[in-house]
Image (cartoon, coloured by chain):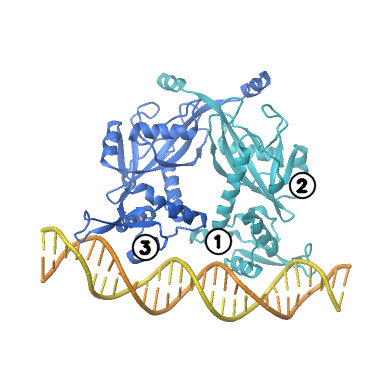
Chain colours: A blue, B cyan, C yellow, D orange
Amino acid sequence: MDKQVIDYYSTKDKMYVATDCIVFGFDEGELKLLIFKRRVEPNKGEWSLIGSFVELEEDVDEAARRVLKEITGLDNVFFKQLKAYGKADRDKGYRCISIAQYALIRIDDYDKKLVEKHGAFWYRIQDAPQLVMDHDEMVKDALKELENKARHQPIGFELLPQKFTIPQLQSLYEAIYQREMDSRNFRKKVLSLKVLKKLEEKDKVSSKRGAYLYKFDYKNYQKLLLSGYNFEI
Amino acid sequence: MDKQVIDYYSTKDKMYVATDCIVFGFDEGELKLLIFKRRVEPNKGEWSLIGSFVELEEDVDEAARRVLKEITGLDNVFFKQLKAYGKADRDKGYRCISIAQYALIRIDDYDKKLVEKHGAFWYRIQDAPQLVMDHDEMVKDALKELENKARHQPIGFELLPQKFTIPQLQSLYEAIYQREMDSRNFRKKVLSLKVLKKLEEKDKVSSKRGAYLYKFDYKNYQKLLLSGYNFEI
DNA sequence: ACAAAAGTGTTGCGTGTACACCCATGT
DNA sequence: ACATGGGTGTACACGCAACACTTTTGT
């Protein structure tokens, strides 16, 4: 790096860059949000999204992956950048911008324990307490984004276990869209997309009759995306 | 700010935060991009988006507005955050993340002169030279975003002069979508939205017969948005 | 007169939506 | 036997896409 470069840059301000994760999960028919109690000032003890400062030698996305891994133990999580929150006064400590990312994960019992060990908790979206700083705004924005994405991509599959029933898929969509749907039309629509593989097994947890389990067919999904299809339900 | 806060923050890395603007304009039936020659190292002399470091006491959005104002003289420009580019190695100088924002502006002759005075140039998207760092990626992402937004909001209006003809509006959409459209269907669709006010005047620039000029009806547009309408064309 | 762009309607098809009943099974 | 959730088919409405000709006027 030559001297000129250093000189020019050094006349500029540096700041902290953080990343915050809006982690959505789906459990017991409800959309849930992972939050935890801040262990550092400012706002120590208040509820917050999980996040971290981005380190000098790591990509912003890596930082988010690192945090998520620490807290949930999960590695291959779907996540996507939401946007940067860059108001000058958003952090009372020192100028700090945050790049918010939302993640979709499949909640299972193994995760639940890890999550608790790190002092984090799953809250139903509507029951979540107030969060520090602009985190409530991040959640609101992420929810809107989730709704939009679900409309055009079968994002919902990220939140379900590998094998799932159509009624489960429907209740996930109902949780995301916050409205009820007609089960006949829902079924017709998702099946017409040909991205579900029906299995022979049934899931008998939620009914006596049992519902057929399905798997997501990733190969057909790729084809669907290429042909410009739209997942509006 | 208490001591604990300073101590905790001070163990963390600070970095430079920049904002880069992908500025789209529409002129002579073509979608154009505003770029300029970098005047600082690294990559001095190469083509670049317009951008700036974010200062300590300004919001990220303000920084973008400031840059745009400097270069184009324009104040009330539509713009929207695209996303943050945060790869650790994206800037050879020193760790620097950039928050990209795209802007839509109406090109007119007044702007053109100001823009030239600042060493910036309007390029047709497909003719634009290679840009420094990850700026080409930003442009690509912004274009995709523009296409998506246009599908759901009449974003196109930001790019046209206050008075415009329907064929002009159509050629804008054709430039954004990169495909031709049927003029009968296009006209039917935009008129059905009831967001255009027909004027008595005609524009005779592009034809002998002349085409009626229209204005955008912002009041009706607000209603349309609230009712959840979708601008798919 | 002719070239060049503006403007105008109709029809078919596909997709979303509304809606009611039977099925399988555990208790 | 009955309660509970799973699974199936039809009819109508609406919006999108395809398609051709007339109008206006400057040269």
Between marks 3 and 2 in the image, the one whose residue lies nearer the viewer: 3
> Which chain does tag 3 point to?
A
Residue B174, by quadrant, is bottom right
> Marks 1 and 3, Cα distance to the nearest angstrom?
23 Å
Examine the rendering and report whether any part of residue B122 can be seen: yes
Marks 1/3 in contact by CB < 8 Å: the verdict is no
Q: Are marks 1 and 3 on the same chain?
A: no
Decide: few, some or many residues near mark 1? Use Cα within 10 Å; few <14, some 14-19, many ≥20.
few
Q: Earlier in the sequence, mark 1 or mark 2?
A: 2
State the residue position of label 3: A186
Examine the rendering and report whether any part of residue A147 can be seen: no
Q: Amino acid at mark 3?
A: Phe
State the residue position of label 2: B110
Q: Are marks 1 and 2 on the same chain?
A: yes
State the residue position of label 1: B232
Decide: few, some or many residues near mark 2? Use Cα within 10 Å; few <14, some 14-19, many ≥20.
few
Disc 3, SS = helix
Q: How many marks?
A: 3
